[in-house]
Each structure stands twice: as C-alpha cells, then as structure tokens.
Amino acid sequence: MRIALFVTCLADGLFPEVGKATVTLLERLGHQVVFPQAQTCCGQMHINTGYQRDALPLVRHHTEVFAPYDVVVAPSGSCVGSVRHQHAMVAARHGDEPLAARANEVAARTYELSELLVDVLGVEDVGAYFPHRVTYHPTCHSLRLLRVADKPLRLLRNVRGLDLVELPDADQCCGFGGTFAVKNAETSTAMLADKMRHVLDTGAEVATAGDASCLMHIGGGLSRLRTGTRTLHLAEILASTEDSVA
C-alpha cells in the first residue's frame, strides 16, 4: 500500500524520531511511505485558540496537499482529530462549501497510526521487540475524538519482551492541551502532577502514548524530577527490533 505521511509540526520540528519510526515501521510491514514536502501546519493550534479565519488557508492547503493520496497516516491523535472534526467545519463556517466537501474526503482517508495498523492494514503483531516495563497513556483526542479504544494496547501486548502495566486513572488528561498549558499554567501543572504520580506508581521504565505533545508535557515533568522514567512515542516502540532496541 502507498501511504502518505502527515508528520505534524511537533514531529517535524521537535521529535523527528517519531516520524522516522513511523516510516521504518510501515516499510518493515511492506508498505511504501511517501512524504508530501509541501505539507505545513494543519491549523489545529489556530482553531483551538479561536483564530478560525486564520486557520482557513491552512485547512485549504492541507486539503490540497493530501487530496491525491488514498491513505494518509499521522503519528498523532490530536492532529488527526483536527483533520476529521475541524477542517470541514471551519470551511463551512466561512462559506466555502466546496472546500468543506474536499476536506471531508481527505478526512475519511486520514488515520492515526494505531487505527491504520489495526483497522486498515489488519495487523496487531508488527514484529516489534522492546524488553522494558511500559505503561500507556491514552491521550484525550485519541480517546474521545477518534475513539481508538484499545487498539494501541492490542499492539503493545504483541510486542515481544514488553511488560505492559496498567496506568491508574489512565483516561484522565495529562494537563497539556496545547495553549491550555500556557494560559492555565497552575491548573496544567496540577493535572501533570497527578499524571506523573500515576505513571511512577506503575514502576514503569517507559511511559508511552500516541501523541508527542502529551509525551513532551509528561516527559518534561518526569525529567525535572529526575525520576529515571522516560517517555517514548508508540511508533518508536513498535518500530523497535532486537537489532535496534536500546
């Protein structure tokens, strides 16, 4: 299958290893991954912050860039959630019904990584090896907007050597929420403290999730406390093999 990678701003600018792991994983499974170089921000930050009119050109550009592809994948529940639930809405709200229709078509072909693997490619064992104790945080957008349910857990349970431990109160937000963490810093910090406590209670070596944004928030807190617990994107664990694992 020919799959277009929607890498997202965070993976492109701060966590390139997440994008690379996504490509490594999909190519190992026998698929061709292409990277449309004209892609930019999908506009989620603008939309969530109330600047919908400013997001409209980004929605139009994203739709044009990914329209030629039958399947699009992103290692981010947050960005896929925006494509599916916000793009057509923004276009329609500003009177561009043709764009709304095209955005819906692209959205229907856009998948978060675990969705693509389980629902489209029909695979739960990707041949990964990761001999560490791991806990999984289901990010808000993947859990509530995309409803990926237990797909990431099903993939993790098939990783050889991995000891998967349940995260207490897993469905509670980590407190990031994009600009929420900036505008409501004290509330965000309190939510992060709860999430970190639950992660540490598991005794996990690694906390994983499907969104680099949430992992950046959780990982930053754990690092400042010098806990020794690290964060790693789901794609990076699934891309690991006996030859590559650290």
Image: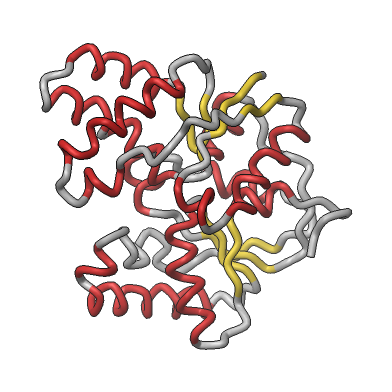
Q: 244 or 133: which is nearer to us?
A: 244
Q: Quadrant of residue 89?
A: top left
Left or right: where 166 falls relative to 80: right
The residue positioned 45% from the left and 54% from the top of the image is 138
The residue positioned 26% from the left and 31% from the top of the image is 57
Q: Residue 92 at what x, y percent from top left?
A: 15, 22
Q: 233 or 63: which is nearer to us?
A: 63
Q: Is residue 140 above or below residue 53?
A: below
Q: Residue furthest bottom?
A: 225
Q: Is residue 114 above or below residue 60?
A: below
Q: Residue 185 at what x, y percent from top left?
A: 25, 75
Q: Quadrant of residue 59?
A: top left
On-image quarter of the N terminus: top right
Q: Residue furthest right?
A: 243
Left or right: where 225 falls relative to 28: left
Q: Residue 149 at what x, y percent from top left?
A: 45, 43
The residue positioned 79% from the left and 53% from the top of the image is 129
Q: Residue 83 at what x, y percent from top left?
A: 35, 33
Q: 20 or 1: which is nearer to us?
A: 20
- Count the labels in the image: 0
Q: Quadrant of residue 30?
A: top right
On-image quarter of the C terminus: bottom right
The residue positioned 50% from the left and 35% from the top of the image is 6
Q: Residue furthest front?
A: 38
Q: Is residue 91 above or below residue 243?
A: above
